[in-house]
């Protein structure tokens, strides 16, 4: 079975100059292995050492992304944060640590479920829950089959994720998504674009914020149909 999200990470990194990569929250290690095979110097890190499958090929460091990280300032040229940010209870502290260990000009590539795609929006209309965020957290955290750190805690719209990176000194370079789903809902696009236009016009008439930049992102095919949001951001040079 194809891993469309992994393919997008490879696509975003394959043209980059080779260097040291931290795959934090690496899980079983498939992303770390793929980057290793591309020629990157990869260090995999996770809380659960037992899950990692490639210790014979890739260096592994046991650590918790939600705590102070055991790495020196500017240790890595790239950081991979695949499907982790939605699990964090302290995202601003974590992002500050990731920025600290990135080299100036280094890049963070992260992903999270794209809750603004049309399929997710329709689920919210019917259930009051975004796609991938359907379970009640209190009950789910008591489920013996659910590992506590695997809970989806924060559903990130693009808006808040963009601000998290901006606040942390990371400038978005590329916005992408994994595979497109929910194409049968494309009949909703004219209505969505009309609503975005009317909202922007009302804001301009009142002298409020200009929605042109954000509306262009929100009305893109990737945002409307992409299953996962994937962002490449660069640490600003001092």
Image (cartoon, helix red, strand yellow):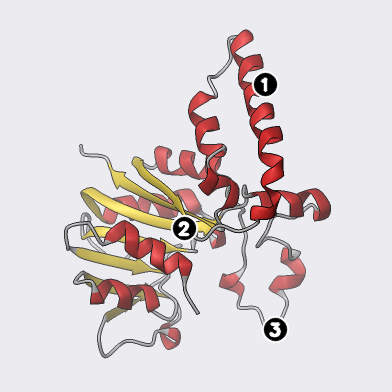
Please tell me which residue is depicted at 43% across the width and 70% down the height of the picture.
25
Please tell me which residue is depicted at 46% across the width and 62% down the height of the picture.
66
**Which circle marks residue 144 in the picture?**
3
In the rendered view, does 31 fall on the left or right side of 116?
A: left
Label whose residue precedes the other's in the sequence (2 or 1): 2
The residue under label 2 is 111
Please tell me which residue is depicted at 38% across the width and 87% down the height of the picture.
53
Q: Nearer the viewer, residue 219 or 59?
A: 219
Q: Is residue 120 visible?
A: no
Q: Would you identify the image quadrant in which residue 7 lies?
A: bottom left
Does 48 appear above or below 117? Answer: below
The residue under label 1 is 198
Q: Marks 2 and 3: CB-CB under 8 Å?
A: no
Q: CA distance from mark 2 to mark 3?
A: 27 Å
Does 168 appear above or below 108? Answer: above
Does 19 appear above or below 38? Answer: above
Q: Residues within 10 Å of mark 3 (few under 14, many from 20)?
A: few
> The C terminus appears in which quarter of the rendering?
top left
């Amino acid at each position: 079975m194809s891993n469309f999200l992994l393919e997008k990470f490879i696509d975003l990194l394959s043209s980059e100059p080779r260097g040291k990569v931290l795959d934090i929250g690496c899980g079983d290690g498939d992303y770390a292995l793929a980057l290793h095979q591309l020629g990157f110097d990869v260090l995999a890190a996770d809380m659960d050492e037992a899950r990692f499958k490639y210790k014979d090929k890739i260096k592994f460091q046991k650590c918790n992304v939600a705590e102070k990280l055991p790495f020196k300032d500017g240790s890595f040229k790239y950081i991979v944060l695949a499907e982790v940010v939605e699990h964090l209870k302290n995202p601003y502290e974590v992002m500050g640590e990731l920025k600290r260990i990135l080299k100036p000009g280094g890049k963070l590539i992260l992903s999270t479920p794209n809750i603004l795609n049309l399929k997710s929006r329709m689920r919210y209309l019917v259930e009051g829950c975004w796609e991938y965020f359907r379970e009640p957290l209190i009950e789910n955290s008591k489920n013996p089959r659910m590992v506590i750190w695997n809970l989806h805690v924060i559903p990130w719209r693009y808006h808040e994720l963009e601000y998290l990176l901006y606040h942390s000194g990371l400038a978005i370079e590329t916005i992408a998504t994994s595979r497109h789903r929910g194409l049968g809902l494309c009949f909703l696009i004219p209505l969505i674009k009309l609503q975005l236009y009317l909202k922007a016009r009302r804001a301009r008439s009142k002298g409020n914020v200009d929605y042109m930049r954000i509306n262009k992102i929100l009305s893109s095919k990737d945002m409307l149909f992409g299953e996962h949001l994937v962002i490449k951001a660069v640490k600003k040079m001092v």
